[in-house]
Image (cartoon, rainbow, N blue to C red):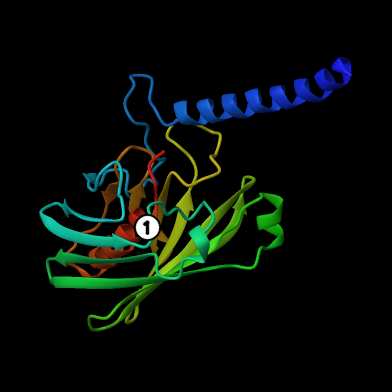
Amino acid sequence: MRHRLLTVAVPTLLALLLAGCASVREGRETRGHDGRDAHMAQAPSVAGVAEESFGKPGWARKGDFSLSGQRVRYERGAERLALFEPLPGNLRAPLNFSWQGPTGESSTVCEAWAQEVSANGRLTDSKPWVLSCRWGSAPAAMLQIGEGQMRRGKLSREGAYRRGELTVGLRSVHLLEGNAQPRTAAVGYEMLHQGTVVGSLDLSGSQPRLRRPDPATPLGRAVTEAALALALVWEPS
């Protein structure tokens, strides 16, 4: 009987130890050799753009913060939200926020729903959900992001932000600078206009870091609004 218990317990213990080691290893990958936060791999088109840190290490349900002197207020529908984790309790109203930008206040209301699990989702044991946000200020804008493509064995999140005739593509990034092994969850997002990366949101550290065009321009406004939505449905590792 004792021999049978050991036969069951040893493989289980080994599996738990390996899972723990993988978790520690992935956590270490978010830190540089000097102990500081690692960085998301950047496209050449935005590599020289200055970073703006914003927000705080833990979002909580509601609060406010400043983005380069521009005030942002938010309220979330759950203590924890992440596009790479299951939707908590089929939450329908995950987020609303307002941003006091250069052209005035911009208010956003977001909805969420679970997608039917695709073949890719089953392959990666992922449960992607869709985030959909609307801005009512003229012309009205909409953002939607959900399951994307399989990239190097990882299931991405992809979507778009649209305001009038302007469309900005959104896609998750899974590579850290100097690390060839992609992570399962995103380390950030890229914003694309006409096929070129024009902005990025680095989520590899304890606070979001944004690279964007001038927020007073239509393109800069679009990148900023999309980045705020994506940052607020992310949790620091």
Of residues 227 and 57, the one nearer the viewer is 57
Residue at figure coordinates x 39%, y 58% from the top left: 78
Residue at figure coordinates x 68%, y 57% from the top left: 120
Confirm whether residue 50 shows in the render: no
Question: Which of the 4 quarters of the picture holds residue 72?
Answer: bottom left
Residue at figure coordinates x 37%, y 53% from the top left: 79
What SS does tag 1 mark?
Answer: helix
In percent of width and height, residue 147 lies at 56, 62
In percent of width and height, residue 199 lies at 32, 55
Q: In the image, 216: left or right of 94?
A: left
Q: Quadrant of the C terminus?
A: top left
Residue at figure coordinates x 29%, y 67% from the top left: 222
Confirm whether residue 234 shows in the render: yes
In percent of width and height, residue 169 lies at 42, 65
In percent of width and height, residue 48 lies at 27, 43
Q: Is residue 6 above or below residue 40?
A: above
Q: Is residue 17 above or below residue 172?
A: above
Name the kind of residue labelled 1 in the image: Leu
Q: Is residue 91 above or below residue 176?
A: below
Question: Which of the 4 quarters of the picture holds residue 35?
Answer: top left
Q: Quadrant of the N terminus?
A: top right
